[in-house]
Amino acid sequence: MVIAKRKRSKLPAQVGCGVLAGPLFVVAFMMIGARRPGYDWHRHTVSSLGDGDRGWQQRVNFTLTGVLYCCAARGLRRCPRRTVYPGAVPALVAAAGIGLIGSGVFVTDPMGGFPPVESSEDGSKDAALADTAPTREGTLHNVCAIPIFAGIPVAGLASAVVAARRRDYGWATYSAASSLSMLCSFVLMGRAFGGVPRFVGKGGIFQRISITSGFGWLTALSLRALISYRRSSCR
């Protein structure tokens, strides 16, 4: 009985990690990007901030955010199903957290000319080669992005379906809209970096829309779970 009470006492702090993780992540990468010479948030990815001499700042941001989401997933797993549904959602949140930690461990390859390619010994710069020759570490970084940019939308759409069945239409609409926004903007980001003329130079914008849509939904989900827990505790 005492152990159960202790676990319940940790739940608000764990779920609260999910409330804070997204906003802290966004504010951090905005501040980091503003201090990096040559970085253009319109065209460069957030992951590009993890490369270069000061890349450790964004790598720490990735890692800490991932840890926060893993903690949140643990709390969400113990929340009532009527608040956090379906049961796969906490697992998908944990997977996104692990993906963020991996994104901090493995550094992305240079993309879109950032960070600037240093001159070789003969004074030449082969920026095209730097952007097209993937490394093993860069590939692993991209793999770690899968549970983030695919897992979060899947969690949102799953929540939307169950919410609609329970006639919770407000949450269903928001969950579906956030998931579709994250997916569509991620696809547009891919087209921007793929060289489609009308989207070139806007890849960073599309990625930020994708991140804020998905991470914003996780914040709302955590707030929803936290408020429900508070109300049930007061009864």
Image (spheres, rainbow, N blue to C red):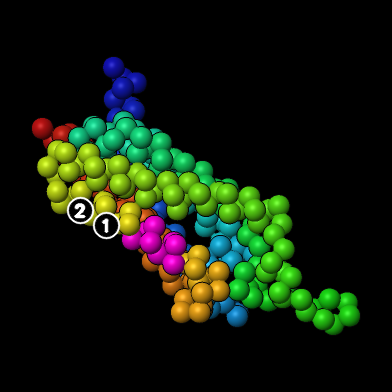
Find the residue positioned furthest to the right. 122
Percent x, y of residue 41: 49, 75
In three-dimensional space, the C-alpha distance between marks 1 and 2, rounded to whole angstroms, equals 6 Å
Please give the name of the residue rendered at 41% of the width and 40% of the height, measured from the top-left corner.
Answer: 92
Percent x, y of residue 90: 37, 37
Q: Amino acid at mark 2?
A: Thr
Q: Residues at badges 1 and 2 in contact (C-beta under 8 Å)?
A: yes
Label 2 element class = helix
Disc 2: CA contacts within 10 A as few (<14), some (14-19) or many (>=20): some
180 or 11, nearer to the observer: 180
Q: Which residue is mark 2?
A: 173
Label 1 element class = helix
Which segment is the magenta one?
181-188
122 or 21, nearer to the observer: 122
74 or 124, nearer to the observer: 124
Q: Give left or right: position of 202 versus 141.
A: left
Q: Is residue 79 visible?
A: yes
Residue 116, above or below 83: below
Residue 82, above or below 27: above
Find the residue positioned furthest to the top. 1
Q: Is residue 27 visible?
A: no
Percent x, y of residue 146: 50, 49
Q: Main secondary structure of the magenta part?
A: helix
